Image (spheres, rainbow, N blue to C red):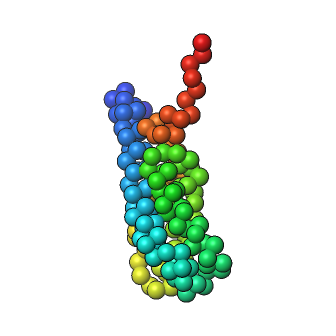
Amino acid sequence: MKRSAATDKLRTLLGPIAALVLRIAVGWVFLRHGIAKVGMGVAGVTGFFHSLGIPYPHVFAIVVMVVETVGAGCVAIGVLTRFWAACMVVDMIVAIHLAIMPTGRPFELEGLLGAAALALVALGAGPLSVGRLLSRKPAAK
């Protein structure tokens, strides 16, 4: 099927905006969850992770808190997006398997966040990002 010029123009216009909106949404939700974990403190998150049977719960409590705060902020502004989004995918896979599925609760939010983070791994930050601004090389003299 052949695409029309109007479709290509619309895709060119909306593509960067879509990546921006996706980054901000994913970053915001992860940041909200990260802030909640910071409120629990490392000891509280460690205790929760220990109750789930996560090995090295103290280490992984710190890792998850960093991913869900620093990583979330970086994703939202578009800095190291693929790296942090990949960390978020792993975070959601572990959360689904160790925290959600054993309880029998549905995992729509975690599944959606994991899928959205995976899309950011594939797409990257897009042109409307701080990372893109920082990577621009100065003009040749």
Where is residue 24? Give x, y as percent: 39, 51
Give the percent coordinates (x, y) of residue 80. 56, 47
- Residue 112 vertical position relative to residue 46 in the rendered view, above or below: above
Task: Looking at the picture, tell me which residue is in the foreground, 87 or 104.
Answer: 87
Q: Is residue 123 above or below residue 10?
A: below
Location of the C terminus (image quadrant): top right
Q: Quadrant of residue 54?
A: bottom right
Tell which of 22 and 64 is nearer to you.
64
Residue drawn at x 61%, y 72% is: 60
Which residue is nearer to you in this view: 23 or 4? 23
Q: In the image, residue 56 lies at what x, y percent?
A: 66, 78
Q: Residue at x 55, y 55 (%)?
A: 84
Residue 2 falls left or right of residue 122: left
* Residue 63 or residue 39, whichever sits in front: 39
User: Looking at the image, which residue sits at the far top?
Assistant: 141
Residue at 54% across / 84% down in the picture?
A: 47
In percent of width and height, residue 126 lies at 48, 40
Q: At x 43% / y 61%, what residue is drawn?
A: 31
- Give the total number of marks visible in the rendering: 0
In which quadrant of the rendered image does the N terminus lie?
top left
Q: Is residue 140 visible?
A: yes
Whether residue 6 is situated above or below residue 33 in the rendered picture: above
The reply to whether residue 89 is visible in this rendering is no
